[in-house]
Image (spheres, rainbow, N blue to C red):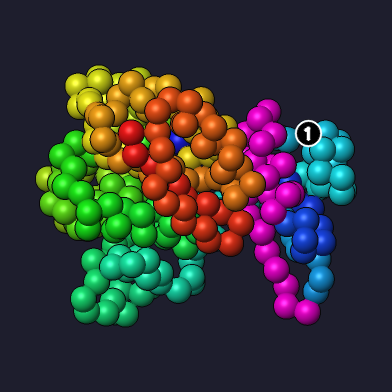
Amino acid sequence: MNAETKVPLWKARVRVPAHETARTMALFELTPHPEPVAVLSHEVPGEDDITVEALYAEPADEAALTEIIGHAVQVAPLPDQDWIKLSYEGLPPVRADRFFVYGAHDRGRVPGNVIPLAIDAGEAFGTGHHETTSGCLEAIADILRERHPRRVLDLGTGTGVLAIAIAKASGLRVLATDLDPRAVAVANANVIRNGAQGLVRCVTADGFAHEAVAQGKPWDFIVANILAGPLTRLAPAMRAHMAPGGQLVLSGLLRNQEAMVLGFYHGNGFRLRRRYRRGPWSTLWLTL
């Protein structure tokens, strides 16, 4: 889900009261050095406290995180395993509007009357199980029912799930980009797995810095499921690369980050169409 996704090698862990979960996740998300690859929460039935974990591609400062969060944070290296893939193994399939996201272990459970998305996490994020991905899928379904875009960009594609969803639902060509070449490799494999080779092109790019992105503008439909910090920094570039009347889906942000993100986009001429809230996470549908 992050445009700057890397394979996590370190984990920060803290136990907090349930009512502090959203605040703690937001603090992990907003701590920039290093920026987390993902922030997760785990609830154990019968226990009052919640475990919040942040995954990093480099060591995080345990003392600094403890001071920021106000509870004792433990930082430890992870064994050399594919933790992203392992974290999704055994999870049930996900239904988001007309999309049905499933892994290899659920291949025989796909119902009729859905758009099936066979997604392997590999070394990238975005399988549909995360609230931000399912929120994006619902926003995509709403936009495609109302609009007929022509130029579509998935910025920070991760596993490619959103680009594949748009392509399979509409038959549109989609450019999918990610900063991490390993995520692009995973996305390409998922494109092939879903028979979308002629529709989805995956490239390695840092934000809008790629010839294919420049050549494709003005985009009239952009999806960006990354983190709140990069989203705010990209607001002027979003405006510069989007066609008037274009549709924009932003996610990877917490509910209490909505006002901050919207402030940057309102200042660049975007207006809010709809919020999609799943747990502590939010997805925003904007128009220019």
Residue, x 64% and y 47% (percent of image)? 256
Residue 276 x %, y %? 46, 56
* In the image, residue 28 lies in the stretch drawn in magenta: yes
Image: 282 above or below 224: below
Residue 64 located left or right of residue 151? right
Residue, x 59% and y 48% (percent of image)? 254
Give the residue type at disc 1.
Asp
In this view, the residue in front, 191 or 283, is: 283
Mark 1 lies on residue: 61
Locate the C terminus and report the quarter of the image it occupies: top left
In this view, the residue in front, 139 or 87, is: 139
* In the image, residue 120 lies in the stretch drawn in magenta: no
**Magenta span of residues:** 22-46
Image: 97 above or below 213: below
Q: Residues within 10 Å of mark 1 (few under 14, many from 20)?
A: some
Residue 194 x %, y %? 22, 58
Residue, x 36% and y 36% (percent of image)? 155
In this view, the residue in front, 86 or 112, is: 112
Q: Is residue 184 visible?
A: no
Please identify the quarter of the rendering in which residue 177 is found: top left
